[in-house]
Image (cartoon, rainbow, N blue to C red):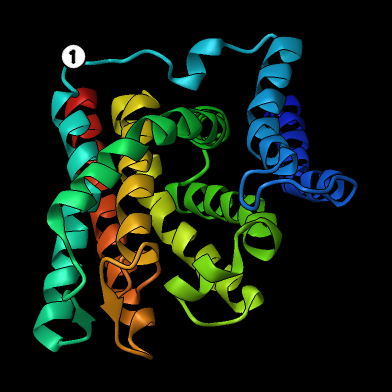
Amino acid sequence: MNKKAIRNIGVFVFVVIISGWIGVLVDSFLTGQPEGDSLGMGIWLVLPLLTAFVIILFSKASWEDLGFKLNFKGNIKWYLASALIFPVVTGIVLIIGAATKWIDFSAFNLKPFILAFCSTLLISFLIDIFEETAWRGYLTSQLVKLNLNDWKIYLIVGCVWGLWHLPYYLVFLPEADIQAVLPVSRAIYAVVSLITMLCWAVMFIELFRVTKSIWPCVILHMVEDSLINLIVISGYISIAAGKEILVSPINGVITSILYVAVGLGIRAYRTHANQIIIK
């Protein structure tokens, strides 16, 4: 393995893991900041991407690895899939919830929901450029170049992605939002969310690898941020007590299993396509 590449990845992972805690420290010295939108959160969001850029600049690595090209040719179906995966899986979970009577839709109002969903797409898109460039464009691409097997890549990216979120779940995220999703302590919610990210990582990584572009991942992430958080946190649905862990569109076990299945489906397509090319 390339020792220089491993060192650079190690530096990136270290900065990523401490970035949120740097933000927490900054916020501890500042008062009167809006909850969920502080300077510390800005540092937490931006620092991974800046770190990746600095490493690439000083190591003279290829900027093409980040996947900034759109790569539309042959990938239109994946762009379409990136916009539909979260709505389709969420729809399946909601149908399961309705059939079992674990989810109550009495508060659901379609027109305000659509307006709220559309109003958040742009800001989600911009924020998710930072995340997807860091996690898929940099970290995933560098791990692939080390010729690690797929499962190691899923595990490393998923864990780093989850650990980066820890300050968000333990400090930044408003308590009311946590209780709206899963009525547990912050620590337990952080653990559940880490497992969720490990499950999601398969899907995001495979979408990046099959298209060699971050943009389908940005769209996938944008739709996720604008859709499932809105449905649950804004109260468009209510989930029966004790059933959140099963059918929550955010952290539900059934939901996560479906996303792993989607990811493995994309992986099967990619590996089959690669075998055809080799032949």
**Residue 194 or residue 170, whichever sits in front:** 170
- Give the farthest residue toward the right: 29
Picture coordinates of residue 246, whole percent (x, y): 32, 81
Is residue 1 shown to the viewer in this render?
Answer: no
In this rendering, the count of numbered labels is: 1
Q: Secondary structure at mark 1?
A: loop
Picture coordinates of residue 30, whole percent (x, y): 85, 45
**Residues packed near mark 1 inside 10 Å, few (<14), some (14 to 19) or many (20 plus):** few
**Residue 171 or residue 165, whichever sits in front:** 171
- At a point 40% along the width and 69% down the height, the residue shown is 251
**Residue 70 or residue 150, whichever sits in front:** 70
- At a point 15% along the width and 24% down the height, the residue shown is 76
- At a point 29% along the width and 58% down the height, the residue shown is 259
Amino acid at dot 1: Lys
Measured along the vertical axis of the image, is residue 38 above or below residue 113?
above
Q: Label 1: which residue?
A: 73
Measured along the vertical axis of the image, is residue 201 above or below residue 143?
below
- At a point 20% along the width and 80% down the height, the residue shown is 104
Rendering quarter of residue 107: bottom left
Figure quadrant of the C terminus: top left
Picture coordinates of residue 198, whole percent (x, y): 48, 59
Rendering quarter of residue 277: top left
143 relative position to 233: left or right: right
221 relative position to 133: left or right: left
Is residue 88 shown to the viewer in this render?
Answer: yes
166 relative position to 151: left or right: right
Measured along the vertical axis of the image, is residue 163 above or below residue 34?
below
Picture coordinates of residue 192, whole percent (x, y): 52, 72
Figure quadrant of the N terminus: top right
